Image (tube, coloured by chain):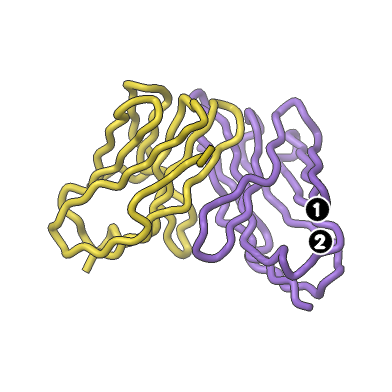
Chain colours: A yellow, B purple
Amino acid sequence: NAGVTQTPKFQVLKTGQSMTLQCAQDMNHNSMYWYRQDPGMGLRLIYYSASEGTTDKGEVPNGYNVSRLNKREFSLRLESAAPSQTSVYFCASAVPSYEQYFGPGTRLTVT
Amino acid sequence: KQEVTQIPAALSVPEGENLVLNCSFTDSAIYNLQWFRQDPGKGLTSLLLIQSSQREQTSGRLNASLDKSSGRSTLYIAASQPGDSATYLCAVSSGGSYIPTFGRGTSLIVHP
C-alpha cells in the first residue's frame, strides 16, 4: 500500500517547455487534488477532481490543465512553463469529508 | 469564503514543554478540521481529523479540540521533543465540495 505517489520528485524546465506531473493513489479514493506550495503563500489549490470523470478549477488554475485518467490517476500538465510556476507541487486524495492524504511532492524550477 | 489563520507563525520552546498551537476559521459551517505535520522538504502527514460533530481527538501526545461556535481549534502537544520540530498546518473543510482551506502553518522548533 504505497498511498499517494508522485513523479518526478525534481524537475528543471526552461521557460516555454511543457511537462506533465503524475499522481497515483491506491486507496480507492474518489477525490483527488493538485496544490502548489510557495513560501509565504501557503498551500493553494490548482485543480481538483471530485470523482472519476470530473475536474474543477481551484484558486490558481491559470497555466495548468489536468486529466483524471481513471480512479487512481490524476495528472497535472504545464503547457508552456513560466518562472512564476516555480514551486513545490503536491497531489492529495481523500474520501469526501474524511482525511486527506498527500504525496511527497514535486519540486519544479522554471528558468 | 472560508479563511483560516494560524497563530503564532513560529514558536521555539525547550524540550519537555507542553504547548498549544492555534487555528481559527471564519465560517463555522464546517464538515471537519484536520491537523497536519510537514517536515522540511517533505509532504504533509495527517495527524488528527475532527469531524464537525466531535469536540476533540487524541493520538498519543497530541490532542486536538474543536469549538465551532467560536471558530477555533487547538492542537495540544504534551511533553514536547526535538523530533516534534516541524511545521503544523490546519485545514478546514466547508462548502458543498468538501474542499479544505489551509492555514499558513506554525513553524515549531523544540530545542534540547
**Discs 2 and 1 carry the same chain letter:** yes
Under mark 1, the amino acid is: Tyr
| Dot 2 crowding, Cα within 10 Å, few <14, some 14–19, many 20+ | some
Q: Chain of mark 1?
A: B
Gap between marks 2 and 1 measured at Cα: 6 Å
Q: Where does residue A44 sit, x and y in percent of width and height? A: 43, 48
Residue B19: mark in rendering: 2
Residue located 62% across and 61% down the image: B87
Answer with left or right where residue B74 lies relative to residue A108.
Answer: right
Residue B74 location (% of width, % of height):
76, 49
Tell me whether circle 2 and circle 1 mark residues in contact (CB < 8 Å).
Answer: yes
Tell me the element at label 2. Answer: strand
Q: Residues within 10 Å of mark 1 (few under 14, many from 20)?
A: some
Q: Which mark identifies residue B104?
A: none
Amino acid carrying mark 2 in the image? Leu
Q: Chain of mark 2?
A: B
- The correct choice, above or below, for A23 with respect to A8 in the image is above
In which quadrant of the rendered image does the C terminus of chain B lie? bottom right
Q: Residue furthest left?
A: A16
Relative image position of residue A97 (x, y in whole percent): 59, 27
Earlier sequence position, callout 2 versus callout 1: 2
Location of residue A51 with respect to A57 vertically, above or below: above
The extreme front residue here reads A1
Q: Nearer the viewer, residue B33 or B26?
A: B33
- The quadrant holding residue B82 is bottom right
- The residue labelled by disc 1 is B76
Q: Residue at x 79, y 50 (%)?
A: B62
